[in-house]
Amino acid sequence: MTILPQPVRPWRLWLVWGVGVAAYVVSVTNRTSLGAVGSDAALRFDADASTLSMFAVIQLFVYGGMQIPVGLLLDRFGARPIVTAGMVLMAVGQLVMAVSTDVGTAILARVLLGAGDAAVFPSVLRVVATWFPQQRAPFVVQMTGIVGQTGQLLALLPMAALLHATSWTVAFGSLAGLGALFAVLTFAIIRNHPPTSDADVSVNTETGAIAVVRSSADLRQGFRESWGHPGTRLAFWSHFTTPFAGTAFVMLWGFPFLTAGEGLSPATASLVVSAFVVFGMLVGPVMGALSSRHPLRRSRMLVLPTIAIQAVAWLIVIVWPGPAPVWLLFLLALALATGGPASMIAFDHARTHNPSHRLSTATGIVNGGGFIAGLIAIFLIGLAMDLQGAGTPETYTLEAFRIAFLTQMPLWILGSVFIIVERRRTRVRMGLDEPRPRRRDRDRDRG
């Protein structure tokens, strides 16, 4: 007979989760803190558009590169020390950013920030897996993601207002202080697992099944087997293609485009970017429900239409004669906001087409797709601005921004082609479609 661990008191369960998700909110705030003050950063560091792009590119590169090491560390030490270390790294990174006056020091700050940020969300997911029953964990994970995105709102108007009311050092120093506070809170309150368990395990309270929670990826055979399945490649290209435009918009280039390019006031620009965040939070559960109800039509019904909506919205804004009306810019933000929820469908693909023993590997591969595309998009936009002689805030123009944002189109086209190809191969692998006959077989039939 299986003896189930005693249930944890609800107040303690939600306290641990609450501190964890609050730490994730702070993490997202730190991640996007440069988005609303990009022009100020360009002036402070005398940086052109390509250099400004490098701040975000390096941060994302470190974030993506740290995912597998973080998984290994979580399996070795558990969530509590890793999330605490992440908050400390982000606090140090923002402190360095607060006192930096040159590009090299600012890049070091973004490296520290990316490394700290990489530790937080996986640690919070680990907390959910070990503290909540298996059947409740998926809902809590969704709520964690939705609540966490409110951190983008804190990084918009409040961050810019604080900087302009005080100074660069005070604004980023305040974020460093917030990170230090949550380093203390996470270490004091979060525990690796409930007191009723002696290891990191998840429990199904209905069946009594107990499973060891693992976060690390199999770097040997697992990677080859995961990538060899067309379903994993479909997931990779889905995550590559759907979120990068929103990432580039909210992390760096959206605010300068709206203010210096379209001529909006900082307050109105903040409302547009806030609409992006809020709509993404609202559409996420809807898209998740549709994905669950129509698992065999996710790519055609949700992923590809999302890509088309984003591309069409950008094209309309780009070809609009003169500055776009505010209502159109809000529609652009809403269109871009669909990319984040659509990208989560990629992880549904990964879970569907990979056994549990290599799911962490497949998830890491898929997660890399979005970061690779985000890196490329942010860098290409900055490079295009520089090549047009519009690399500094004094030289930003609407026409330069329009041409720069056109560099996203090849990424959408490339990703869409691979989604169509891998979707076909996945359906053949599942036995839903017949494989296409080879050319020599067709020639033989004709003969």
Image: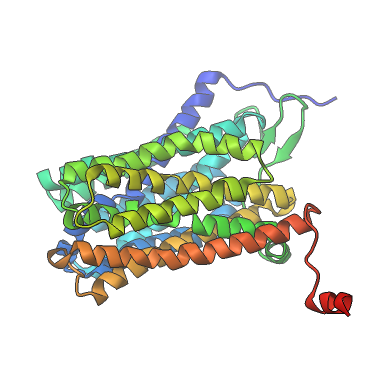
Relative to 429, is 84 on the left or the right?
left
Does the image show residue 315? yes
Residue at left offset 60%, top offset 30%: 132
Q: Look at the image and tell me in which quarter the C terminus lies.
A: bottom right
Tell me the quarter of the image containing the N terminus: top right
Left or right placement of residue 212 versus residue 313 in this view: right
Q: Residue at x 60, y 50 (%)?
A: 300
The coloring applied to the image is rainbow
* Image point (34%, 44%), residue name: 331
Residue 412 pos. (x, y %): 47, 62
Task: Give the quadrant of residue 278.
Answer: top left
In the displayed structure, 431 sits above or below 48; it is: above
Q: Position of residue 146 (x, y in %)?
A: 45, 36
Q: How many marks?
A: 0
Please provide percent x and percent y for residue 321. Answer: 22, 57
Q: Is residue 131 above or below residue 294?
A: above
Residue 44 position by quadrant: bottom left
Q: Let me know if residue 23 appears in the view.
A: no
Q: Is residue 47 above or below residue 94?
A: below
Position of 294 with respect to 206 (left or right) is left
Q: Nearer the viewer, residue 74 or 248?
A: 248
**Which residue is painted at 37% across and 43% down in the image?**
334
In depth, the one of 138 and 338 nearer the eye is 338
Is 245 or 211 nearer to us in this picture?
Answer: 245
Depth order, front residue of 125/418: 418
Relative image position of residue 124 (x, y in whole percent): 51, 40
Q: Is residue 42 above or below residue 76?
A: below
